[in-house]
Image (cartoon, rainbow, N blue to C red):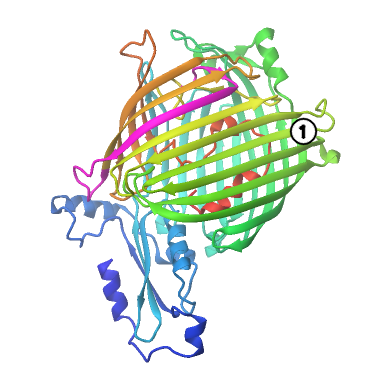
C-alpha cells in the first residue's frame, strides 16, 4: 500500500485549485487518475514478513500468475473523469472482493491540489490453484473424489476445473469452465461437460449480473441436461450398511429471465419476467444396490419399487414466470465470522423475492408454480444475526395431476447468530438452527440427518426421512500462531443435534433426537485468504458408541454459515423448476 501511495503522489503535476460550477457538480472533486497496483500473493518487500520464510513467499509468487490489470480495471464502477463518490469506490471494492482469486482489495482516493482525486486500487492475489479432495474415515478411509481448479487461469480471472467424484451412488467426472468477463464485457459464461453413473451431464449458462448496488438490469439464459440415479436409503442400522434403492432420472431444463431494479444503493424494488421449460423422465426400472455396492444392482421387489414409482411423476412443462422482489440492504465488512482473518462482506437488512409461474397447457402440464425467498440480517455490537428461507410448490390444474391441492411443497429456514464480544475478537460462537422438509411430494424426495451439513458424527446415509430439524453450536477461534504472515490458523469445537420425521418421503422414519460432538483445525493460505480448509473429527453421542465410531472429514470452505449460499443438495434435486433461485445471487455480487 505504501508503494501505491508514493506512486500516486508522483503522478501528474498539481495545477490550480478547482472552483465554480464544476466544484458544485462534484462536491468531492473529479477522479483525474486511476492507478491499479495488482500484487502477487506476497509482497516480498514488506518488512513485516518473517525473513525465515522468504523462500516460501518467493516460491509461491513464482508458481502463481498475477492477475492482469485489465481484469481488475474492467470491474471498477468508476472511470477517470467521473465524480469522486466514496460509495461507488466501496461498491467496486466489494465487487472485486467477491472474486475468489483476490485475497485483499483496498480502494481509496488521494486529494490533489487541483481539487481532483487520484484513486488507488490496491489488490493482492489469493492462491488460485485448488485441489479439493474429499476424504472421510467412516469405518475405514474412503476417498470420495477430487476437484482440481485453477481460479485465475493465466491471470485472466477465469476458472478451469477438472472433477471426479464417487460418493455413494454419485460417480461423476468431467470438466467445467467459468469466465466472468466474456469478451471483456460484463457478461458471464459457464459450461460443464461430463459423465455420470447413469449417463451424461451438460450445463451452459450466460448471465448478466447486477453491477453492485448501482446496476439496474440483470438477466440469465441457462440450459442443462443431467442423467443421474436418485438414491433412496431403504433403512439404516448401526451394524449394517444401508441398501440403496435407485431410480434413473433424465432431467432437461431451459431458462431465460430478465430483471429490472428500480432504485439503487441498496433500496430497490425488483420486477422481471422469465420463460422456463423442464422435461423430467424416469427411463429405467427401479433397482436395489445391496450394502451400497452400486456396481451390483438388481431389480427391486414390488414392495420396494411401489413407493418409489408412486413418487415419480414425469413432467413436461413450459412456463411463463413473473418475478417480484423488494430489498433494503447495506453492506458491512467483517473478519472472523466464516473465515479466519480474510475480509468478509456481510449483507445487512432484508430481501424478499417471489416467482410465480403459469404453465402453457398446449406444451404439456397444466399447473401453477410458486416460490418465495427471504433473507434478513442485523448486527449488534460485535455480533451478527441472520437468516434465510425458501418455499416452493406446484398446484395442479389438470393432467397429469389430480385435484387442485398444492403438491411438491419444499421449504427450508436457516438462522444464524455469530456471537462476539467485539468485531476484533479472536473467538466467534456460531449458533445455527435449520428446519427443512417436503409435503405432498410427487417427485423423488428424501432427506437424511447425518453428513457434513447435518449431525456430523453420523454418516450422510443415516436416518432418512421427509422433515428435519438441526441445531449447531460451534466455537471458532483464531490463534494468530505460529506464522501469521504466512498463513492463518485456528481451531473449532462443535456440537450438533437434530431429529428426523418420516413425513411422506418413501422409506422415511422417525429418528428420535440424535447428537454428536467434535473438534477441528482451520487453516487459510495465504494469510488473509477467505478460503478456509478444515480437518474435523466428530463422534455420535449415544449409548453403545465405540472408539471407532468417529467421522474424520477434510473440507474446503465453510459448509455452515451465511457465506455458504449453495442450496442443500437433497432439496435442490427435488425442487420444482423455476427461475427465482438466482434472484438473490444477482444482488450478492460475483462471489456469492
* Residue under the point 54% across and 33% down: 568
Residue closer to the observer: 512 or 285: 512
In the image, is 508 to the left or to the right of 152? right
Q: Which residue is drawn at 81% across and 28% down?
A: 400
Picture quadrant of residue 473 = top left
Task: State the residue position of label 1.
Answer: 395
Where residue 234 appears, as percent x and y from the top left, is: 57, 13
Q: Answer above or below: position of 55 versus 252.
A: below
Which segment is the magenta one? 460-488
Does the magenta run of residues contain 479? yes
Q: Is mark 1 on a helix, strand or loop?
A: strand
> Which residue is rendered at x = 61% and y = 24% of the image?
230
**Picture coordinates of residue 107, whole percent (x, y):** 38, 66
> In the rendered view, does 173 fall on the left or right side of 426?
right
- Which residue of the protein is positioned furthest toward the left in this rendering? 52
**Residue 101 visible to the viewer:** no
Q: Which of 60 and 592 is in front in this view?
A: 592
Q: In this view, does 288 lie to the left or right of 322?
A: left
Among the 4 quarters of the image, the one containing residue 19: bottom left
**Image quarter (top left, top right, bottom left or bottom right) of the N terminus:** bottom left
Give how far across and how far down residue 476 sits, in percent.
32, 37
Q: Residue at x 45, y 50 (%)?
A: 346
441 w.r.t. 377: above or below: above
Amino acid at each position: 500500500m505504501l508503494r501505491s501511495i508514493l506512486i500516486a503522489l508522483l503522478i501528474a503535476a498539481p495545477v490550480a485549485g478547482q472552483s465554480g460550477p464544476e466544484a458544485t457538480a462534484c462536491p468531492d472533486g473529479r477522479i483525474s487518475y486511476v492507478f491499479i497496483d495488482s500484487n502477487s500473493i506476497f509482497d516480498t518487500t514488506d518488512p513485516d514478513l518473517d525473513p525465515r520464510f522468504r523462500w516460501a513467499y518467493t516460491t509461491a509468487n513464482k508458481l502463481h500468475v498475477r492477475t492482469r490489470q485489465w481484469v481488475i480495471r474492467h470491474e471498477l464502477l468508476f472511470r477517470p473523469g467521473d465524480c469522486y463518490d466514496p460509495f461507488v469506490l466501496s461498491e467496486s471494492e466489494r465487487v472485486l472482493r467477491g472474486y475468489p482469486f483476490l485475497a485483499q482489495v483496498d480502494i481509496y482516493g488521494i486529494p490533489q491540489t487541483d481539487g481532483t482525486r487520484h484513486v488507488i486500487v490496491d489488490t493482492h492475489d489469493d492462491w488460485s490453484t485448488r485441489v479439493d479432495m474429499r476424504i472421510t474415515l467412516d469405518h475405514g478411509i474412503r476417498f470420495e473424489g477430487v476437484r482440481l481448479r485453477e481460479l485465475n487461469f493465466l491471470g485472466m480471472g477465469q476458472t478451469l476445473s477438472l472433477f471426479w467424484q464417487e460418493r455413494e451412488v454419485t460417480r461423476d467426472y468431467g470438466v467445467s469452465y467459468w469466465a466472468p468477463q466474456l469478451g471483456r464485457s460484463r457478461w458471464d459464461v459457464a459450461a460443464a461437460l461430463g459423465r455420470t453413473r447413469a449417463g451424461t451431464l451438460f450445463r451452459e449458462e450466460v448471465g448478466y449480473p447486477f453491477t453492485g448496488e448501482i446496476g439496474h438490469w440483470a438477466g440469465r439464459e441457462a440450459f442443462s441436461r443431467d442423467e443421474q440415479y436418485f438414491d433412496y436409503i431403504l433403512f439404516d442400522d448401526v451394524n449394517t450398511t444401508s441398501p440403496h434403492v435407485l431410480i434413473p432420472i433424465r432431467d432437461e431444463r431451459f431458462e431465460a429471465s430478465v430483471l429490472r431494479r428500480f432504485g439503487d444503493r441498496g433500496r430497490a424494488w425488483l420486477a422481471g419476467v422469465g420463460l422456463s421449460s423442464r422435461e423430467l423422465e424416469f427411463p429405467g426400472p427401479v433397482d436395489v444396490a445391496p450394502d451400497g455396492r452400486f456396481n451390483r444392482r438388481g431389480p427391486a421387489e414390488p414392495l420396494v419399487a411401489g413407493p418409489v414409482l408412486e413418487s415419480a411423476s414425469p413432467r413436461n412443462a413450459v412456463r411463463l414466470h413473473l418475478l417480484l422482489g423488494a430489498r433494503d440492504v447495506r453492506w458491512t465488512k467483517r473478519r472472523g465470522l466464516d473465515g479466519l482473518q480474510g475480509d468478509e462482506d456481510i449483507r445487512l437488512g432484508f430481501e424478499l423475492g417471489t416467482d410465480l409461474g403459469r404453465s402453457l397447457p398446449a406444451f404439456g402440464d397444466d399447473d401453477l408454480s410458486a416460490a418465495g425467498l427471504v433473507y434478513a440480517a442485523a448486527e449488534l455490537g460485535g455480533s451478527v444475526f441472520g437468516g434465510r428461507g425458501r418455499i416452493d410448490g406446484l398446484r395442479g390444474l389438470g393432467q397429469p395431476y389430480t385435484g387442485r391441492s398444492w403438491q411438491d411443497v419444499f421449504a427450508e429456514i436457516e438462522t444464524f447468530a455469530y456471537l462476539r464480544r467485539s468485531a476484533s475478537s479472536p473467538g466467534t460462537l456460531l449458533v445455527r438452527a435449520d428446519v427443512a422438509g417436503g409435503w405432498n411430494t410427487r417427485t423423488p424426495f428424501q432427506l437424511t440427518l447425518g453428513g457434513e451439513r447435518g449431525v456430523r458424527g453420523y454418516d450422510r446415509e443415516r436416518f432418512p426421512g421427509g422433515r428435519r430439524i438441526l441445531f449447531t453450536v460451534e466455537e471458532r477461534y483464531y490463534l494468530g500462531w505460529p506464522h501469521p504472515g504466512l498463513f492463518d490458523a485456528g481451531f473449532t469445537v462443535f456440537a450438533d443435534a437434530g431429529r428426523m420425521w418420516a413425513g411422506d418421503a418413501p422409506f422415511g422414519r422417525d429418528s428420535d433426537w440424535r447428537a454428536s460432538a467434535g473438534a477441528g483445525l482451520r487453516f487459510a493460505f495465504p494469510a488473509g485468504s477467505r478460503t478456509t480448509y478444515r480437518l474435523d473429527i466428530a463422534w455420535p453421542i449415544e449409548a453403545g458408541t465405540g472408539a471407532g465410531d468417529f467421522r474424520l472429514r477434510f473440507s474446503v470452505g465453510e459448509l455452515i454459515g451465511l457465506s455458504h449460499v449453495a442450496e442443500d443438495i437433497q432439496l435442490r434435486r427435488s425442487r420444482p423448476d423455476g427461475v427465482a433461485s438466482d434472484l438473490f445471487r444477482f444482488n450478492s455480487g460475483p462471489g456469492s
